Image (tube, rainbow, N blue to C red):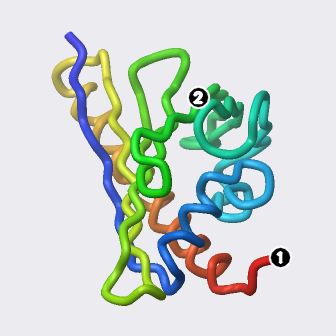
Amino acid sequence: MATRYQITASRNVAASAARVYDIISDYRNGHPNILPSNFRNLHVERGGRGAGTIITFQVRAFGQTQSFRHTVEEPEPGRVLVERDTAGPAMTTFVVDRGATEREARVTITSDMTTTRSGLLGMIERSMSSAFLKRLYDKELAKLERFASRPPG
């Protein structure tokens, strides 16, 4: 029986919500600059900005490299962007809200995952992948803040 679980990381970023969303939704010139080194070989198959974009990439974790293909959706353009795995039910959602001022954004990354393992193995898989992805998303949000603080161009 499949078990669903979530991994979430949030951060206040010292840049406007519009600038931050623009970076996240730009898979050619923005998003590649915020990915931690565990993400490799990001390739835009179709599109490149926001909804309709299809990307492929690899993630290096626990001594192995896995390949992924995601489609990008924008259920709330300018605020919510979703990367949906074409091979399964996993998806990652980026939510960008205005922070305390117009020069601050609150960014949340949430991955919805599924494990087919049950019992102790399932619990170990969820625990390890949750801890790994939380660290990865914290690094991604830190890189996003550094990149967003640079002048556009």
Q: Position of residue 88 (x, y in %)?
A: 45, 17
Pick whichever of labels 1 and 2 is earlier in the sequence.
2
Position of 9 with respect to 27 (left or right) is left
- What amino acid is labelled 1 in the image? Gly
Q: Residue at x 48, y 46 (%)?
A: 81
Judge by depth and name the residue closer to the eye, 138 or 56. Answer: 56
Identity of the residue furthest to the left in this view: 119
Quarter holding the N terminus is top left
Q: Residue at x 27, y 42 (%)?
A: 6
Label 1 – label 2 distance at C-alpha? 26 Å
Judge by depth and name the residue closer to the eye, 27 or 142. Answer: 27
Viewer-nearest of labels 1 and 2?
1
Compared to residue 71, the image places residue 134 above or below, namely below
Q: Residues within 10 Å of mark 1 (few under 14, many from 20)?
A: few
Q: Tell me the residue that label 1 is attached to.
A: 153
- What amino acid is labelled 2 in the image? Thr
Q: Tag count in the figure?
A: 2
Identity of the residue furthest to the top in this view: 1
Position of 145 with respect to 132 (left or right) is right
Q: Residue 92, located in which quarter of the rendered image?
A: top left
Say which element carries label 1.
Answer: loop
Quarter holding the C terminus is bottom right
Q: Position of residue 28 (x, y in %)?
A: 79, 50
Q: Tell me the residue that label 2 is attached to.
A: 71
